[in-house]
Image (cartoon, helix red, strand yellow):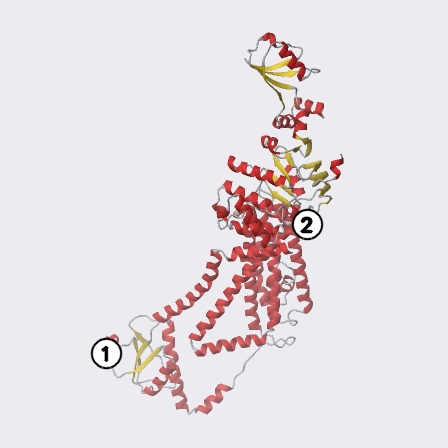
Amino acid sequence: MLHKLHTMPILELQNLRKYFATQKAVDDISLTIEKGQIFGLLGPNGAGKTTLIRMITGIFYPDQGEIIFDGKKFDPLNDIVHIGYMPEERGLYKKMKIGEQALYLAQLKGLSKHDATTKIKEWFTRLDMDSWWNKKVEDLSKGMSQKLQFVTTVLHNPKLIILDEPFSGLDPVNANLIKDEIYNLAKGGATIIFSTHRMEQVEEICDHIALVNKGQKMLDGTVKDIKHNYKENLFRVSFSNKLMAEHLAIHLFQVKEKNEHEVVIKLDPGYTNNDVLEYFIHKGLHIESFNEILPSLNDIFIRLVEDTPAARQFQQITA
Amino acid sequence: MNKILLIIQREYLTRVRKKTFIISTILFPLLYLGLIFGSTYIASSTSSVLRVAVIDSSGYFDKGKIERENLKDSSNILSLVNYSADSVKANYKALGYDGFIVVSPESNWEAGLKLSLQTGRTLGIESSSGVQRKLNNIWDGIKNEKLGITDSIKTKLEESTVTLRQQNFNDTTANSGVATGIGYAAGFLIYIILLLYGSQVMMGVMEEKTNRIAEVIVSSVKPFQLMLGKIIGIGLVALTQFFIWVLCMFLIYNFTSSLGNGVTANNVIGGVQAIFTSIDVPLILGCFAFYLLGGFFFYSSLYAAIGSAVNEDMREAQSLSFPITMIVILSIVLLPGVIKDPSSPLAVWGSIIPFSSPIFMMARIPFGVPGTVPWWQLGLSMVSLIIGFIFTTWFAGKIYRTGILMYGKKPTWKEMIKWAIKR
């Protein structure tokens, strides 16, 4: 616990609530996000992610609850300068020239014209966008304009960067580019909140995640911890020998899948990896690989979010 | 505040640099110029000098009198000829005449003359009335001679006349003719500006939604700042365009009137001076500026609210803005009634309610303050307009902040009002 006293979390959400006429968009959510984290905010469409983000960026005001930004009560007017936000519904003034527009957006964030120009030039050079300065946004391809949008989001060196579905519509090359930039920014001390419903992207990039559904928080922890919480003791073992029926005893594990050289087993309660390894070795099998199968975030997500009796039962057990 | 200035600057510059702005700003004065020159050219090329032969058997007309009149009015030339009527009729073209008049030998100066201008083709009314005027001038001279009316008697007769002028004893400088003219002009001007630029604001506000940049901007500035910046920026564009037009028309007017007849120019200048002495120019200019600005902010806020609520579809925007536009049009429709009786209840109350006050009050003010418009009415009207536009701006701000982030079905006015009331 001691290390936490050294750095204040960049963002603390305390019991936030936001209600609209027809629904409880955010229904008592609390989160803590530490500086330098790449934090994944996950959830299906309509879960309340966007509403939550709009409260963090000062676009909406919470009906109840507190937002603490960098140790102080969140003050939209002044703190907005330290936040960069790329919304899901994003665009730029089509008919405006790129350089001029980037300058305008940076100045709106509080940068001086001089500083903004310097920073824009730096980013443009780094991302190979120098020739774009006098082009109009409508002349760009979709991938190019996404790149531009990203640049305008991070131009003013914000402490907190919020990206809502940043990879949607990007080709793999540009997606990779943006991913690298995200890592760079985090290394440089910025905190990134990355909101998406695409789980595979999250597993790769985020260290810490929160899963939101129907306005409430379902999960909150590191990717590793969460996966371990939901593990089902599944293992994939492959052998150089051919598998025979007698190799697969029943009291140690259950067989979920098998083919000639590979088996997926679920450990019975009370038994460990080592027990299984000893057993196979004892049976004379040559083990080529032995891997735990952790559930993907996608699987966990589906399990938690699906409103089926099985899922609800599952939720009761893990709650 | 700084951010609002940034927004104003951006809105202003992007619009002023657009080709459409430059074209429409230059086009209008060019059209005006073209109209003036075009019409004068057409007029002059079609109207040539009318040449009329006068066959006088009465002896009343002599060359001298005719020459003198010809000098005064050169749009037609009368010439005394010795030919017979028949030979002129047969040869008028060859002789260079358009027509002829026969004065019979039995003519009597006391009975007057009934003459007929014989022409080969039908002339317009203008041409024959010009000839009639000239003939009457000559005839007046002949009558005066016969009656023994000397020039001095003639002068005495002309000088003694009765003239009647209306005067408001509460406001001795007012002139109802001038006031009516200015009232109409001012009211109409404000009407045009409100409608034209109100809809520009509405379309300008839709820009953020169409480009889907609304959320990005609103994460840097408050929606209210964005809205205000847009309204002021577009208002300045309107002002610039308007100013250029007025300047161009003024220059064109001076230029063309200096080309034209010296007498006409002097008359106009004299007329303009008369206008300026009968009204309080600083007051009218000041009030005009106030009501123009106030009316603009009052209405463009409402137009901004509408623009933010609709989803890129111009027709949606037009149908929602219909009630607002109707109110403005109603003001203009009722304007003649206000000018006819500037102290009627319609005029008084209409010039206090902010919806119609910019147009109605500006129409009433030239009739005299405090004569027709007591100070308390003016004051109440101004305060009410200020409160009015503060309210519509606040109201629009609330609608705007919800509207620009909303994509989906078209809202009704009822829904929009709900947005305004909630936090």
Q: Secondary structure at mark 1?
A: helix
Marking on residue A233: none
Task: Evaluate whether label 1 is on the same chain as label 2.
Answer: no
Mark 1: amino acid: Ser
Q: Position of residue B343 (x, y in %)?
A: 63, 67
Q: As drawn, which residue projects farthest toward the top?
A: A246
The answer for which chain carries disc 2 is A
> In this rendering, would A24 be left or right of A245?
right
Is residue A231 toward the left or the right of residue B235 in the image?
A: right
Please indicate whether residue B119 sits to the left or right of residue A144 in the image.
left
Residue B251 sits above or below residue B220 on the image: below
Q: Is residue A213 visible?
A: no
Q: Residues within 10 Å of mark 2 (few under 14, many from 20)?
A: few
Which residue is depicted at the point 59% across and 74% down? B279
Q: Residue B114 sits in which quadrant?
A: bottom left
Amino acid type, residue under disc 2 in the picture: Asn
Q: Give residue B386's quadrant in the image.
A: bottom right
Residue at left 70%, top 47%?
Answer: A75
A34 to B112, vertically: above or below: above
Nearest to viewer (mark 1 / mark 2) = 2
Looking at the rendered structure, which numbered label has been put on residue B87? 1
Q: Residue A231 placed where, x, y %?
A: 66, 23
Secondary structure of residue under mark 2: helix
Name the quadrant of the N terminus of chain A: top right
According to the picture, the residue beneath numbered tag 2 turns out to be A78
Viewport quadrant of the C terminus of chain A: top right
Q: Chain of mark 1?
A: B
Please give the count of numbered marks on the rendered protein: 2
The answer to whether residue A32 is seen in the rendering is: yes
Q: Are marks 1 and 2 in contact (CB under 8 Å)?
A: no
